[in-house]
Image (spheres, grey):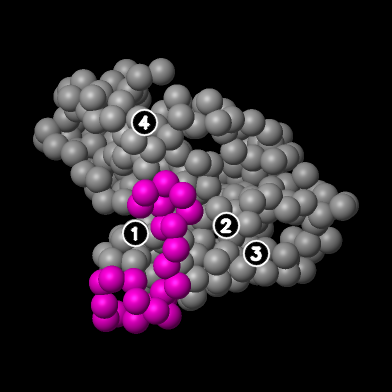
Amino acid sequence: MTDGLSRPDALELLEVAKRAAAAGAAVLGARSARGTGGDGLGVSNKGDAGDWVTEFDVAAENAVRQAIVADRPRDAITGEEHGTTRPEQASGYRWSIDPLDGTTNFIRNIVYYATSVAVADPDGAWLAGVVHAPALGRIYSAARGHGAWLEVAGERTRLAGPVPERRGLILATGFSYDPATRASQVAGLAELMDGFADVRRLGSAALDLCLVADGTYDAFGERGLNEHDFAAGALIAEEAGCWVRRPRLESPLDGGPSAEDRLAAWMCAGTLELSGKFPL
């Protein structure tokens, strides 16, 4: 454990992120492989239709937080389920965690979900991030200045983003739970699809960004995301050499885009040549 007041390097923080993401993924991995209706998962709704939360979300966030606090007791933590907590003697570093990105998939036993963990320095620069997908057996990770990596069954591969000059480009995106925002997204989909051959919507922004990093997708763009949805995945895409645009942080200490920017601003990743296809 460190005192949380020293200035760690990105690789040191990455090790903490890996342990924390693994703790959350271990909770998710306890889900029974049987059943697609959410029985026994403690399912409830957070307000918007389709915005589900399970007992696994909460338990995984608790596990992630405990792992971070064990190593970095004076860091702030922003989580999807418990909001932002900041110690009295805060270090200025802040973690952004989504214990279960892809909750609807998790409930329906669709294996595309993950625990996402990222950390920013006192200026709001993202230093390390991990997206751990237990049902896929994939661990994506990145430390600023040290590249992005995929680990599968103990083998590590450095990621290099989409294949240059590939034909039949695929765009990944998602849609808001808010009906008005979703209607606007659907109305603009045809224009957004210009230049792409097809589109995918698989239900986890964190993993979508990682699949841009590993070259599966050519680009990802979505409006209305929360910070915890994209914090780790965006850094992984960036370190894989992708062009990335994030919504502005409302505060490096508290995290998250402003409500206005969250609904209006796009989270985008891909090659620089594709950057002009996304609205500002």
**Residue 49, horizontal then vertical, whole percent:** 37, 49
Quarter location, residue 120? top right
One can see residue 250 in this view:
yes
Q: Name the N-terminal-most of marks 4 and 1.
A: 1
**Residue 44, horizontal then vertical, whole percent:** 44, 63
Structural distance between the alpha carbons of marks 3 and 2: 11 Å
Q: Which residue is mark 2?
A: 81
Q: Which residue is mark 1?
A: 104
The span picked out in magenta is 29-52
Relative to 89, 161 lies left or right: left
Q: Which mark is residue 19?
A: none
Magenta highlight on residue 34:
yes
**Quarter of the rendering occupied by the C terminus:** top left
Amino acid type at image mark 1 = Thr
Q: Which mark is residue 65?
A: 3
Q: Secondary structure at mark 4?
A: helix
**Residue 211, horizontal then vertical, whole percent:** 31, 49
Amino acid type at image mark 4 = Thr
> Decide: marks 3, 4 in contact (CB < 8 A)?
no
Relative to 141, 112 lies left or right: left
Structural distance between the alpha carbons of marks 4 and 1: 19 Å
Q: Secondary structure at mark 1?
A: helix
Structural distance between the alpha carbons of marks 1 and 3: 22 Å
User: How packed is label 1: few (under 14 Cα within 10 Å), some, or many (20 or more)?
Assistant: many
> Decide: marks 2, 1 in contact (CB < 8 A)?
no
Q: Name the N-terminal-most of marks 2 and 1.
A: 2
